[in-house]
Image (cartoon, helix red, strand yellow):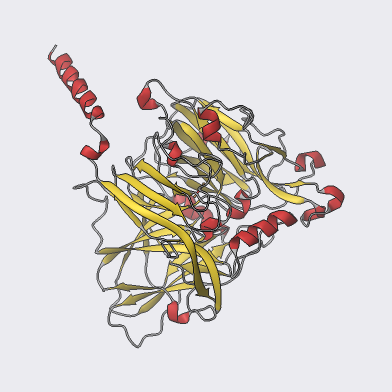
Amino acid sequence: MAGMSIMFKLASLLSLISVIPWAAYATVVHQKFIIGTQKVTRLCKEQEIVTVNGHFPGPTLYARDNDNVIVLVENNGPYNVTIHWHGVRQLRTCWADGPAYITQCPITPGNAFTYNFRITEQEGTLWWHAHVSFLRATVHGALVIYPRFGKPYPFPKPAAEFPVILGEWWSANVEDVIADAIQRGVLPLESDAYTINGQPGDLYECSANDTSRILVRRGKTYLIRMVNAAMNHAFFVKIAEHKLKVVAVDALYTKPYTTDQVLIQPGQTMDVLITTSKPSGLFYMAIRVYSSQTRGGRFINTTTTAILEYTGSINYVPLMPALPPFDDTQFAFKFSTDQKSLRSSVPQRVDEEMVITEGFGLLTCPNRSCEGFMGGRAVGSFNNISFLLPNIDILQAYYHGIDGVFTRDFPENPPLIFNYTQQNPPLPMSFWEPELGTKVKVLKFNSKVQIVFQNTGILTVENHPLHLHGHDFYVVGQGFGNYNPRTHPAHFNLKDPQKLNTVGVPTGGWAAIRFTANNPGVWLMHCHFESHTALGFEMVFIVEDGAGSFNSLPPPPPGLPHC
Ligand code: C2O
């Protein structure tokens, strides 16, 4: 009886709390993003770019877990814009997620939209970026989430912290770069430099004076909040003569992992501790591309640098670390598989099981008039379906029951079983040509989902960084070659696998993920190589409402843009 009355009191207390508006017990973080253009000089050349509040990279947003974040985005630039809060769960706020034509129509020039969401049980580093066309090349910034008041980090408090945003620079208008690629049916032009906090560093022309510097004192521990905002490349990152201790990836704590260098996939974020154990000196932080393609791939083989500077180190020459070779897949695989969650609650059983092949295909062009392989046009696909962006957003169509925008027949398995990872497998030409469609996979609320992503070797064999919106997932297994449903599940890690929002599926291999579909709405899943996303390397999940309003998606916020 006593137990029951306590339960009753607890229940009435909880129902009372749920009627108090958020603002009564959480902080509200207000921010204004003004999208505009800016002339910026890099690599000896002036270039007009799209920026937020005139900065490249854009402003860092600071919040605490449980805060309500309200960002007014005013588009004073020449292009359509949306902003995505990469990795933010957006629990019941799918309308604020941001991918164009998936959860909203773009904000057209001269218009504005207010993103309003709450951080729910997340801490660490995430980031925000434009989610339309190629604009995220310059429209991006870090999102730092501190623990709730009074809650410590799961590691000793660092002396200070600094963001390290890795990016890519084109000495050209990025919107022209992608438009040209799509028109010709080829992958977009490679960038001209990689950047750290917006600067290519002193190994590039006309760049030495602006190399990013990170000032430190000796004998302290610092927190590096690293974001890979690059468009099309994963990076190895190393600091000369300093160990890196990884403590979180994608704002999810990992078991502390000490290493000489890290690998960071595009889209991923990483919290890394360094201890300044030297008496003095200058040390390069250097980044180089990890290119996983067995046939070399396309990238610029250059090294980008920033300088870790101990205070008072005037007459020093910076020391350069020895970076791994660009194709060090062995390190890449070991680094990824070594990471483990600090805490985990992996679904032990699954309700929904999918195998999804992912890779390239080739569309034929009339009279072989495109400039891709065999006069065709390269496209990305999942289960041999290349995603077609609709003209109005899928969320709006789903919520209001508008027909003809998408179909619900995304297949749970590949249309054909073959030796997936063989380079250019001997398949009928019809199979090389993916179907074009706006197909979604519908998931029941709270269902436990397992997906095996299987890379294919059609046209290229390479690592693809796959990102899911609205959910973090556990990577329960990964390997090279073809996934075997009879033998591999027995070796899945269901105890402490790493949790992420973006996983690098090993080149010529597969990765198995598990998550609980507990966030109602429309969620994009795509390759975070923007050059691949642009070619249809995307798919969509719809998570249905659960029982009661607390498990359902609320109506759209005021001022949502129209298409
Ligand atoms: Cu970082 Cu769909 O994006």
Judge whether 450 appears above or below 29 on screen.
Answer: above
Q: Residue furthest bottom?
A: 315
Q: Residue furthest front?
A: 110
In this rendering, position of residue 242 left or right of residue 489: left
Please tell me which residue is depicted at 63% across the width and 64% down the height of the picture: 190
In this rendering, position of residue 384 left or right of residue 516: right
Please tell me which residue is depicted at 17% across the width and 14% down the height of the picture: 4
List x then y, in percent, for residue 490.
Answer: 52, 34
Nearer to me, 440 or 248? 440
Judge whether 179 appears above or below 432 on screen.
Answer: below
Judge whether 476 appears above or below 154 on screen.
Answer: above
Q: Residue furthest left?
A: 2
Judge whether 54 appears above or below 501 on screen.
Answer: below
Please tell me which residue is depicted at 38% across the width and 60% down the height of the picture: 59
Q: Is residue 541 visible?
A: no
Question: Which quadrant would residue 427 be assigned to in this image?
Answer: top right
